[in-house]
Amino acid sequence: MSESALTPKKMLIIGESLLEFCQAEDGRFVLDYGGDVLTAGLYLSRLQEHTKLSIDFLTVVGNEPFSHKMVEYWKSEKIGVDLVTYAKGKAPGSYIMRPDAEHPDYCYYRGNMASRDLFQVKENIVLADSIDRYDYLYLSINTVNMLTHLDQETLLDLLHAANQKNLRIFLSCYYYPQIGSALVPIRNLIQRIWVHTDICFVDFDNQQTFFPDENPADAVQRLCEWGIREPLVTQNHHGYCYWDGKYRHQISLPKPENIIDLTGGHYGFEAGYIAARLMGKSRVDAIRAGHQLSHSVMEHKGGILPANKMPKLFG
């Protein structure tokens, strides 16, 4: 499908926003922004010239200067902020990180995080009634895990409404254990979300905590049996296993050679893959696009790749 033949589409990303404090070589910390699906959504927004996809962000931030500056940054990246709510007395979550090519260190602060109240906002509670203004939803398991049990049920109702109105749902399953430690409830929650999911991204080593499959092909088989229409399992940032509708396939692409920081690599891959699939490209071509963007992200220190460092994924 040519890019000129694509019809404009809209995606709603749902999640948290974070302040990132990244340690520089001199020991000082540099302020930036982060958040799992937000990071991927930002890359997707940069690719809208090719995909004709516009992005809106559903979240809650504080009503202090850091939050306002962060929202201005999203607007500069052409992310729609009409569904961003400002909560008095709250603040964004934050994390301190030490970049590393193999094992980055993170320390999260989420005690007064505004986005935990995502479905305490009246307009968001009834969002299911107007969800058909979008074509796609994109969220992560971390998004769901940060909510209260009652708000998780509200979100699950929203996903059900999205299915009923033929939206496609994309789910990032890279789980940060710092957010919670009760494994059984999280495992059950993941399974309840998967039944609503079209494209699901799973890191094989990361998901072993919940689902100890023998190998990536077994993981893909399990995901298919649980109803996911397009599961994709990654391993070590260069091995990929996918389902083509009939058979499982595994491919291995060149390992990254100049990794500086693993932070955000998963979300670069997801953005590249989604963009390619929305353009009508094959799963293999989408994997190659995600692989390329992921490696560019990991060659940069910090969670978000600067706009002038974006690789040319498409012609």
Image (cartoon, grey):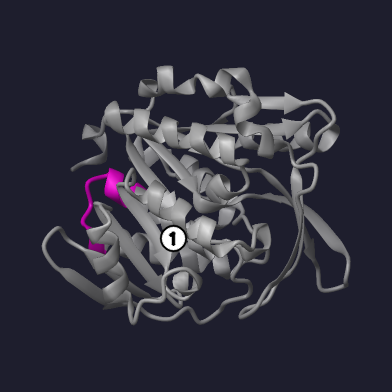
Residue 123 falls in which quadrant of the image?
Answer: top right
**In the current view of this chain or complex, which residue is farthest to the left?**
246
Query: Which residue corresponds to the image point at 33% horizontal and 80% vertical from the top-left?
Result: 215
Q: Which residue is drawn at 73% across and 26% down?
A: 86
Which quadrant of the view contains residue 134?
top left
Q: Is residue 155 above or below residue 198?
A: above
Q: Name the residue under label 1.
A: 269
Q: Nearer the viewer, residue 111 or 104?
A: 111
Q: How crowded is mark 1: few (under 14 residues within 10 Å), some or many (20 or more)?
A: many
Residue 206: percent from left, percent from top: 50, 71
Q: Does the magenta stretch include residue 276?
A: yes
Residue positioned 46% across, 74% down in the render: 208
Residue 262 versus residue 41 in the image, above or below = below
Q: Is the magenta stretch mostly helix, strand or loop?
A: helix
Percent position (x, y) of residue 139? 48, 44
User: In the figure, is residue 221 to the left or right of 77?
Assistant: left
Identity of the residue furthest to the front in this view? 184
Give the residue type that dot 1 points to: Phe
* SS type, badge 1: helix
Q: Position of residue 84 (x, y in %)?
A: 63, 27
| Magenta segment includes 61 | no
Left or right placement of residue 192 versus residue 78 in this view: left
Q: Judge whether 11 appears above or below 268 on screen.
A: above
Could one spot residue 287 in this view of the protein?
Answer: yes
Q: Quadrant of the N terminus?
A: top left
Over which residues does the magenta segment extend? 275-284
Where does the image place residue 218, in percent across and percent down from the top left?
Answer: 28, 74
Closest to the observer: 268 or 4?
Answer: 268
